[in-house]
Amino acid sequence: MTMWLQIDNVTVCYDRQEVLRDLSLALAPGEIGCLLGGSGTGKSTLLRAIAGFEPLASGSIALAGQVLSGPGANVPAHRRGIGMVFQDHALFPHLDVADNIAFGLRGLPQPQRQQRVADLLAMVGLPDCARRFPHELSGGQQQRIALARALAPQPSLVLLDEPFASLDTELRQRLAMDVRDLLKCHNTAALLVTHDQQEAFAMADRVGLLADGVLQQWDTPYALYHEPANRIVADFVGEGVLLPAALLSERCLQLPLGEFCRLHDLPAASGGKVDVLVRPDDVVHDDASPVRALVVGKQFRGADFLYTLQLDDGTQVLSLVPSHHDHAMGEAIGIRVEFDHLIAFPAA
């Protein structure tokens, strides 16, 4: 498949300090990608480098087959054909909504510009807001206008830097899906930066985890959760615990929860010791199971409980259980493990 955005071996430095190191990723036409990671991991720096605001120490960035940054190439930011949506919306307070959206359309004749603005307002669900000013809009409405402004010049790529961080949880979730639908409707490729995993999984076709300036894994949301490439990804993405286990063979191991095998070889480990990733959805509540565990923690989440369960040897695991199973603290319940993905790493 021909890639639309191609980032190859990019390194970015501030005062000779590497912020991003040897980073590579790619997006296909119309794909939405997301960068996850904590503060200071280099997520926004990569967006700024793609937009043309940060120089590269090495590597290259290409969009639609054109090298934007790299050896012998440095296309100015305003000529890259990239739209950007910021966390604080960055709307012009002295311009009304229509003029904000039309800001990047000054090269179009007036009738075309007006039609484009009207089409975008309808697309973001705010057709009657053309003559309102940013301060008269809610946070969610401002974010929709910021997206409409970014899409107005029909960019080759849209960059979104923590676009929903200032919104409440319910609005964030709803707006994230609306934005995804809009981008998909226009077949516009996009790269999103966030620290919210649920937002990343809901919006993106491909997700990457940045840690210490290194892209740890660039994959589908499903693979990032169920098939983490290393311990860093396993620790950061989703919930779960890493349990010590003993290798019995190349494909079988012994856990406090029993003996388990998988189709593929397990990692070689010094002394035959590994750590196994156990997700809450791997631990199934089963009253008929001979394996019992004590409820030592519980979080009500509406549709389900997240239980912290303690085994006889003191080992603790998490289990996601439908909320009609309301067990008391200290109660012993039956559990069994169902590994659809048995992920093991050499023992720490």
Image (tube, rainbow, N blue to C red):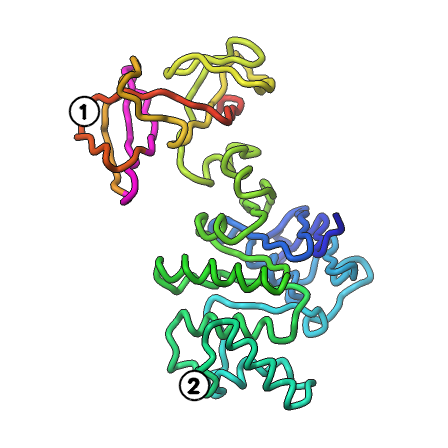
Q: Residues within 10 Å of mark 1 (few under 14, many from 20)?
A: few
Q: Looking at the rendered structure, which numbered label has been put on residue 331? A: 1
Is the residue 315 above or below the residue 236 in the image?
A: above
Question: x, y (%) of residue 284?
Answer: 35, 26
Q: Is residue 172 magenta?
A: no
Q: Which residues are magenta?
A: 301-320
Is disc 2 surrounded by few (<14), some (14 to 19) or many (20+) residues within 10 Å?
few
Q: CA distance from mark 2 to mark 1?
A: 58 Å
State the residue at coordinates (47%, 15%): 260
Judge whether residue 308 is colored magenta. yes
Tell me the tag on residue 132: 2
Q: What element does badge 2 sit on?
A: loop
- Report x, y in % for residue 328: 17, 30
Kindly give the residue lying farthest to the top in the view shown: 248
Name the side, left or right, on which 2 lies relative to 33.
Answer: right
Foreground pick, 132 / 83? 132
Residue 4: mark: none
Task: Give the amino acid type for the residue marked by disc 1 in the picture.
Answer: Glu
When asked about the image quadrant of residue 316, the answer is top left
Q: Is residue 212 visible?
A: no
* Above/below status of 122 relative to 190: below
Instruction: Report the predominant secondary structure element of the magenta stretch.
Output: strand
Residue under the point 56% across and 77% down: 119
The residue sitting at the right extreme is 72
Splitting the image into 4 quarters, where does residue 52 fall? bottom right
Give how far across and how far down residue 300 sits, in percent: 25, 41
From the viewer's side, name the closer residue of 193 and 173.
173
| Label 2 vs 1, first from the N-terminus | 2
Disc 2 marks which amino acid?
A: Arg
